Image (cartoon, rainbow, N blue to C red):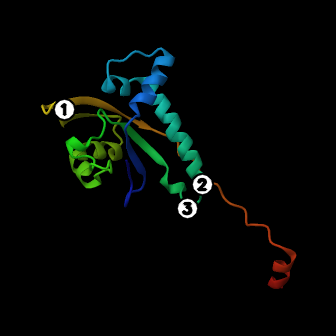
């Protein structure tokens, strides 16, 4: 989930795809005990930083999107969940709710902090409620200069019309 409307830069919350990243971690020989442990691993932050920077480089190739590059991100300590009110039942992000719930984390992204402690109320699948807390790392990424497009080649007739 990206933030940036009315701000000077774009920052983002990232949820990893647990299945994909856990398969990658297994191939890399990285052991972990669950989602929170996996997301806090330096190797996972490096992987996600590389992915964000690749996306930033692609955005830089489009002058209309170059200002949409993500400058900072945090990997959330839990997956966004409809049971916690963060997603609709059709899995759409509830931006206003998330903005309120994670306001201190958004502030940390824009204030330049390199980490932020957070405690989050959650509902477990069995109906119990609890709190997940973590000291989350905030990562900076490279921003690429917008690629300048050369004017499209013009035909001889178009040049002649200019005269």
Where does label 2 land, which residue? 146
Residue drawn at (50%, 18%) of the image: 28
22 is higher (above) or lower (below) than 49: above
How many other residues sit within 10 Å of disc 3, few (<14), some (14-19) or many (≥20)?
few
How many other residues sit within 10 Å of disc 2, few (<14), some (14-19) or many (≥20)?
some
Sequence-first tag of 2 and 3: 3
Q: Residue furthest left?
A: 128
Residue drawn at (31%, 32%) of the image: 136
Which quadrant of the rendered structure holds the C terminus? bottom right
Q: Nearer the viewer, residue 122 or 9?
A: 122
Q: x%, y% of residue 29?
A: 47, 14
Instruction: Look at the numbered disc 3 and give the secondary structure of its residue.
Output: loop
The mark found on residue 52 in the picture is none
Q: Are marks 2 and 3 in contact (CB under 8 Å)?
A: no
The mark found on residue 64 in the picture is 3
Residue drawn at (25%, 55%) of the image: 96
Along the horizontal axis of the image, is 26 left or right of 104? right
Q: Quadrant of residue 35?
A: top left
116 is higher (above) or lower (below) than 66: above
Sequence-first tag of 1 and 2: 1
Where does label 1 land, which residue? 124
Residue drawn at (29%, 53%) of the image: 95
Q: CA distance from mark 3 to mark 1?
A: 42 Å
């Amino acid at each position: 989930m990206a933030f940036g409307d009315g701000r000077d830069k774009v920052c983002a919350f990232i949820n990893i795809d647990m299945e994909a990243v856990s398969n990658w971690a297994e191939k890399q020989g990285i052991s972990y005990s669950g989602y929170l442990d996996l997301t806090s691993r330096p190797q996972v932050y490096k992987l996600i930083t590389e992915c964000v920077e690749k996306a930033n480089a692609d955005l830089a190739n489009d002058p209309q999107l170059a200002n949409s590059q993500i400058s900072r991100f945090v990997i959330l300590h839990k997956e966004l969940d409809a049971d916690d009110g963060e997603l609709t039942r059709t899995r759409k992000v509830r931006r206003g709710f998330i903005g309120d719930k994670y306001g201190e984390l958004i502030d940390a992204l824009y204030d330049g902090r390199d980490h932020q402690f957070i405690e989050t109320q959650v509902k477990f699948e069995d109906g119990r409620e609890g709190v997940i807390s973590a000291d989350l790392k905030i990562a900076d990424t490279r921003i690429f200069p917008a690629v300048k497009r050369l004017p499209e080649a013009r035909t001889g007739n178009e040049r002649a019309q200019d005269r």
